Amino acid sequence: MKVCLRLNLCGMLFVTLVCAASLHAQDAKELVAKAVHSELAADQSDHSLWRYRDEQREANKVSIVVNTRQGSVKRLIEKNGQPLSPAETQAEDARLQDFIHDPAKLAKQRKDAQHDDQNATALLKMLPEAFVWTIKSRDADTLTLHFEPDPNFNPPDMQSRVLSAMNGELVINEKQERIQEISGKLTRDVTFGWGLLGRLHEGGTFRVLRKELTPKVWEITETHVHIEGKALLFKNIGEQQDEVQTDFTPVPQNTTLEQAVELSKPKK
């Protein structure tokens, strides 16, 4: 009788632990889904424009970027830690004037930005289902979750196949249900077209940080990507990016491209 009772208690304890773990995972997944929903809703309502300093550390370049409703102006102001020479500044002025008066270049920029936004939105929507989520830690403002590939996830395209070989962490601002940081690592090689079209190597990493610039308006402030591989048969590729954005200041909605060119000049 005592043995049966002990076995029953062990069984009940096992079931309780399994159910608790399942509930914990489901809670984590729901928290991620809420954050994704908040991000998508915010993206629809956010029409803010910014002037900011963009530092590409891997290339030793610093630029000033100014957003407008017609497109963005990006002026190079430093190379290898030194400001541009007068001749280089003049050439940059000429390049920007050519850009803002070339409808084809402006259209390409808009098309590329739209394509990037669509890809980012598609991947964002997949986050809750692509991974198994667990809560790692919690403090007054943020929630940190760990993610591993969900073996039941079926990537719908080549781009999303990368998700099935990645684990990492997601940090959520719980008060606003906004994504504050995401980082990940490739746990195995990812091949495309049986390796003929491309291969991303195991060990590649990425980290993206976001900050609230004004109430409920969040922007990416750091992007770090270190991935190696091959693409298009035998062409080597390398995605090495360490980009930091600072000094954000709002830009009026009616700012023209010509005004943006002036705003992109370094402040004296």
Image (tube, rainbow, N blue to C red):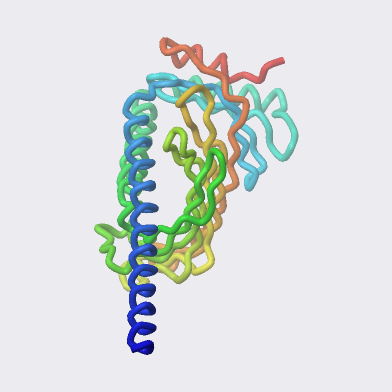
Residue 259: where, in percent of width, then height? 50, 12
Q: Is residue 135 above or below residue 110?
A: below
- The structure residue drawn at horizontal position 53% and vertical position 66%, both measured from the top left corner, is 203
The residue sitting at the front extreme is 1
Whether residue 170 is visible = yes
Q: Residue at 45% of width from left, 64% of height from top?
A: 235
User: In the figure, 57 relative to 17: above or below?
Assistant: above
In the shown orientation, is residue 19 left or right of residue 251? Answer: left
The foreground one among 176 and 207 is: 176
Across and down, in percent, residue 77 comes to 65, 28
- Image quadrant containing the C terminus: top right
- Image position of 247 with respect to 129: above or below: above
Q: Residue at x 42, y 37 (%)?
A: 177
Image quadrant occupied by the N terminus: bottom left
Q: In which image quadrant can residue 134 be found? A: bottom left
Considering every residue shown, the one lying at the far right of the view is 82
Image coords of residue 201 (percent x, y): 48, 68
> Horizontally, is 173 left or right of 112 in the view?
right
Where's residue 211, x and y in %? 54, 34
